[in-house]
Image (cartoon, grey):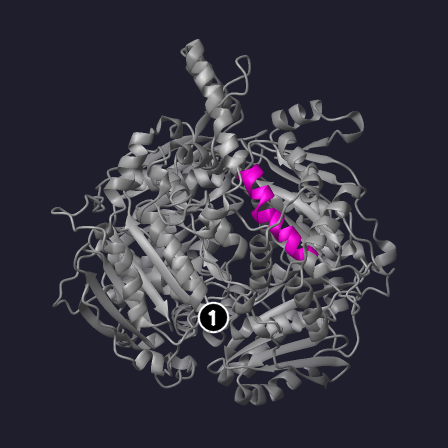
Amino acid sequence: FVKNLMGTLRITRTALAFSWCRLAYGLACPAFTRSAFFATPTPSMSMDSSSNLQRSRVLRLRSSSTSMVIEAPPATSSVVSAPPAEHPAFELVRVEMVDEYTLKCATYRHLKSGAEIISAQADDDNKVFGIVFRTPVSDSTGVPHILEHSVLCGSDKYTSKEPFAELLKGSLQTFLNAFTYPDRTCYPVASQNTKDFYNLVNVYLDAVLNPRATKDPMVLQQEGWHYELESPDAPLVYKGVVFNEMKGVYSSPDSRMYRAAQQATFPDTTYAVDSGGDPAIIPSLTFEQFKAFHDSFYHPANSRIFFYGDDDLYTRLELLNSYLDAFEKPSEPPASEIGTQAFKVEPWRVVEAYPAGEVSEEGAHMVMVNWLLNEEPLSSVDELALGVLDHLLMGTRTSVLYKAMLESGLGAAILGGGVSDELKQATFSIGLKGVRAADTAAVEQLAIDTLANVAATGFDQEAIEASMNTIEFQLREMNTGGFPKGLAFMLQLMPRWLYREYGVDDTSSPTDALRFEEPLKELKDRLANGEQVFEELLTRLIVNNGHRSTVELQPDSSLADTLQNEESAALEEAKAKMSHDEVREVIDKTVSLKEAQLKEDSTEDLATIPRVGLSDLDTSVKTVPTDEEPLQGGGLLLTHPLPTAGVVYADVLLDLARLPLDELPLLNLFSRLVLETGTADMDAVKLQRRIGARTGGISVSTLAQQRVDPTGAVSDPYDVVYMLAVRAKGTKEKMEDMMELVHAVLSDANLDSKTKVVEMLRESKNRFESAFISSGNSFAGMRLASRNSLLGYISEQTGGVSYYHTVKAMLETAQTDWPSLLQRLERLRDTILTQKGIVINLTADPEALAAAQAPINAFVAKLPPTPTGKAYPPSTPWREAAALTAPANEAFAITTQVNYVAAGCRLFEPGEVCNMGAFGVVARYLSRGYLWDNVRVVGGAYGGGCAFNPTSGGFAFSSYRDPNLQGTLEIYADTAKVLDTLELSDEALEQAIVGAVGDLDKPLTPDQKGFRALTWHLTNTSTESRQRYRTEMLGTTREAFTAFGERLREAKFRVAVFGSLEAIEQANSLRTEQDKMSIMTLP
């Protein structure tokens, strides 16, 4: 289950699938981005519905009848062809090539400490380092999770109170975080700048091996838990970052389900407890236990260390030895081996409760069926085949199991992601939420029967072809988006490295996890010989497998109060047992901890943190090659010649400005329907199979942006770009097929699908109700943005609380007056489907771009020149039709133990010309400094920050999984005073500038570059305006901090909060009558 800056990580070894996983806890909180607060969403860079992590190092190979061709990579570079480094402190165990991705991997063993290292040579300047420890647990105190947070709070060599925070402020990092899995803890970093990269590696190595946390109990108190008491008469409370983070996790029904499913499926191993920590158990963790855990598991002999990139190979080893040389290999290895769960013969059932609000009559139960798939490691071909089987069953909404479950009417949304193989043993899970109490057994039986029937009758050949092509395309493309490719490789091979032992003479190694050519060939040969590979695997691993747990979660409207009462009673009992002196000691410790948290680091301590400076930054912006040419009917073609190994990335954008403003909430439903209901020639199943067999994926979403004023002034808040974006990718040989499919889904989708629409709307409603609890900060940000601009208003109407209410209304209409909803959907399509205003954006090799010209022209020629059929007549311009959300202080009551607290306003008015680049530096400084220290470190929230939008002039504060409410708002209110009295050193100013400019320079894949150039074009963002903003950042002075503080002092902030009713009412009791928050209750 879920949490961290990145949401969470899931790495599926069989297909290298990447999505946000249920299993890892991370150090940093969800990022406070411009889109989160100012509602500027763009289509996902991932092209397939499962957000798979695909590969970019690719080889030519023809696959089945689809003849998929992705071109060979360039010849081995000098970086990869160089011999591995030799160092007297290390034994070189093996050297091997991973030809699939042109990697040379050298495995070493550090002679003195026993540490194992893989040093990967790659022609990639986004360098990656990671150190991983096996950290099994026997209880749910959350000790590995708390330790993951704590080790980065200072070390022997880097003595500031939080080196991690200092790195966030001023590094050029492209990745900086840490993860706690159920059985391991991972510390990765990445950077394109070599100096910065080694700075990060040094800080992380000293942090994990020599942390302050094992010597200073205050670190555990801050990051884990502590008693807080302000006065003898005040109530005793728990505080701590992880404690509050996990209260947020345990407020989420989905999180509770995945936790219960894992523990039920692995009842006899470390996975039967919660490595993240149970809030009811975390306060039992002592400092002695905390220190002993580090002593036991954070030894180099228990580590796996990984390097990747184009940096110097000997320097890696020399740097490592400078830390590892202080450790002796223990006579006995650390007791960290992960036990194997033995198969059980008979299925069993687990029933638990989850905290719920008012229980809906239509069902609020959750059911998930889980299988343990293996006791012994799977072969490489079985791993790959399992990945394909997973796609056959669950890869798309028309996959056989996914379709059967969702269309059954037994529940509102799918639970379980199919195969999960992040842990030592793989599992398969499927279920539903939004289930009626009477239907829970039927959900379980449907899953069992569907799988048994498929195993008996077999998979359709077209389905196999589509899934094989999809998985192979992902393997070869290796498109990791903004995620460092080297980190994807590291996480991919880590399970083999951790769970298996490899001798010097072994022909296998952890890097086999990256190889797919041989198992893919074997799998294809077996299929060509008529073997029922997937049916046999399904039968063996699932259908005939007695190790099956069924978990049911039942809603309990009193559980939240029960948990809170139990916590209060435990605290009252603890305080009652304290003597007068012990009470005084808790008060003194509360004061001492806050003083230590807020105390500024000394100049000497800050000087220990290695830094990059202004001289390490590029002063000029990067550009993307872009050519423009007109299309038939007045459209525009943008092309970007970039190396893509023969893959064409095509974006087709239709102008939505012709639609009436009040019809825009239909777009989410329309976007799903065009891909999920089939066409006149293809039913939904056949359409998805054809997309899978002939493309790398097609997605439909909306692109929303506010146009930029070319002078750098705050732009017109009503000047927006709003387009339907169909994004597709495929090989150049399949370009014609791909564009025909794009045309089919846009022009011929079967919109008359009442059953499917009801299913979709029920699912959307359910997902919103879950998201309010897990992502309340995003919804609060949308409420704030809806008051300041048309873009914010549209985004809230199509994705916020208002849209949730619209979904419920559309669901009622679909069930009682389907013809009226169908007519609106058809009119929407007729209005937007036209040559007029179309924009097509292509990113590919020059040769592929030339080959794409004819298919693009043919696609455009088939579109009507102007809107036809039932198209809407010209409607009232949106700027006239929109009534922005009225300014107000709002609170939304949800069933949760934590809060999401936001406040914002339009800080700069349209037409104002200000030093926006410098103000961007100031806002980032506040997030990484003042707000980090006060909202997170002292306040105990999982995260806190602010965001500034130079285009709209908007500014907002926000917190995430926050135990406080009014106190956090008061911290926001004090920001102007902080800037007034700020004494900023030259070093701190330079650090702030470096970090802000570094954020502008994150690495992009070719398709991301092409899409970024498209948004620049659509929003009138010129190279000159981008350069002006960068130059303003580089020239930031102290005066900018003062000026920004003055503007904050004058601003009238409005509040948007998601939290418990009790917390909201308590906050309101402390606010003046005119500042009280209106309260609305959400499910």
- Residue 519 appears anywhere in the view: yes
Question: Label 1 belongs to which residue?
Answer: 692
Residue occupying the point 25% across, 74% down: 84
Closer-to-camera residue (984/709)? 984
Q: Position of residue 729 (x, y in %)?
A: 53, 74
Based on the displayed image, in which of its 4 quarters is residue 986 positioned? bottom right
The quarter holding residue 281 reads top left
- The image shows residue 773 at horizontal and vertical percentages of 56, 39
- Counting the numbered discs, the total is 1
Q: In percent of the image, x 57 and y 36: which residue is there? A: 362
Residue in the foreground of this view, choosing between 372 and 238: 238
Q: Position of residue 64 (x, y in %)?
A: 37, 79
**In magenta segment, residue 622:** no
**Picture quarter with the C terminus:** top right
- Identify the secondary structure beneath mark 1: helix
Q: From the viewer's perspective, tell me whether residue 1013 is left or right of residue 185.
A: right
User: Could you tell me the amino acid type at mark 1?
Assistant: Gly
Q: Where is residue 77 in the image (x, y as percent from the top left)?
A: 36, 83
- Does residue 792 sit above or below 636 in this rendering? above
> Residue shown at 35%/55% (left/top)?
453
Q: Does the magenta stretch include residue 921?
A: yes
The N terminus is located in which quarter? Answer: top left
Q: Is residue 337 above or below residue 869?
A: above
Bounds of the magenta segment: 919-936
Q: Is residue 217 above or below residue 863?
A: above
